[in-house]
Image: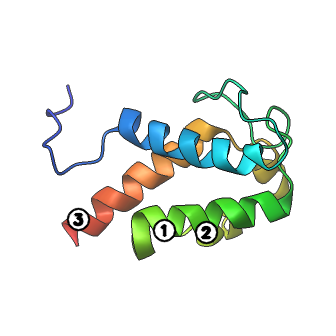
Amino acid sequence: MNPPLTPTQPAPDAVLADITGMLREVLAEYGDDDTVIGMSTTFNRDLELESIDLVTLAGLMEERYGGRVNLAEFLAGMEFEEIIELTVGRLVEYVVWSLRSAQAG
């Protein structure tokens, strides 16, 4: 059983809400900000994001999380197929892990 989250630890639900808000901001540029976004939503197939959209998302994430979360570094460690199949949930897990690591460090 996992220990209860302390208020200083990032909760996956809160990170999902943050990421969803950022994705809606990116999608709004296409007039497509009412798409349903959940943990299993894929960036490529479901959201049809281009690489430039990921750059925009990386900028929004840096504004929100500072240097504690590095989307470019996260993506650089992946194979092309992994990036194509990337889900919002996997990104949320990475953000939660990064924030917890930054707090522990």
Q: Are marks 3 and 1 in contact (CB under 8 Å)?
A: no
Q: Amino acid at mark 1?
A: Glu
Mark whose residue sits in front, 3 or 1: 1
Mark whose residue sits in front, 2 or 3: 2
Give SS at disc 2.
helix
Quick check: 55 above or below 42? Answer: below
Residue at point 72% right, 35% down? 33
Question: Pointer 2: what residue?
Answer: 59
Residue at point 48% right, 38% down? 16
Q: Earlier in the sequence, mark 3 or mark 1?
A: 1
For residue 95, which quarter of the picture?
bottom left
Question: Pointer 1: what residue?
Answer: 63
Q: Are marks 2 and 1 in contact (CB under 8 Å)?
A: yes
Question: Pointer 3: what residue?
Answer: 103
Task: Name the residue nearer the viewer: 62 or 12.
Answer: 62
Q: Position of residue 12 (x, y in %)?
A: 38, 37
Report whether 90 appears left or right of 83.
Answer: left
Q: Amino acid at mark 3?
A: Gln
Mark 1 surroundings within 10 Å by alpha-carbon count, few (fewer than 14), some (14 through 19), many (20 or more): few
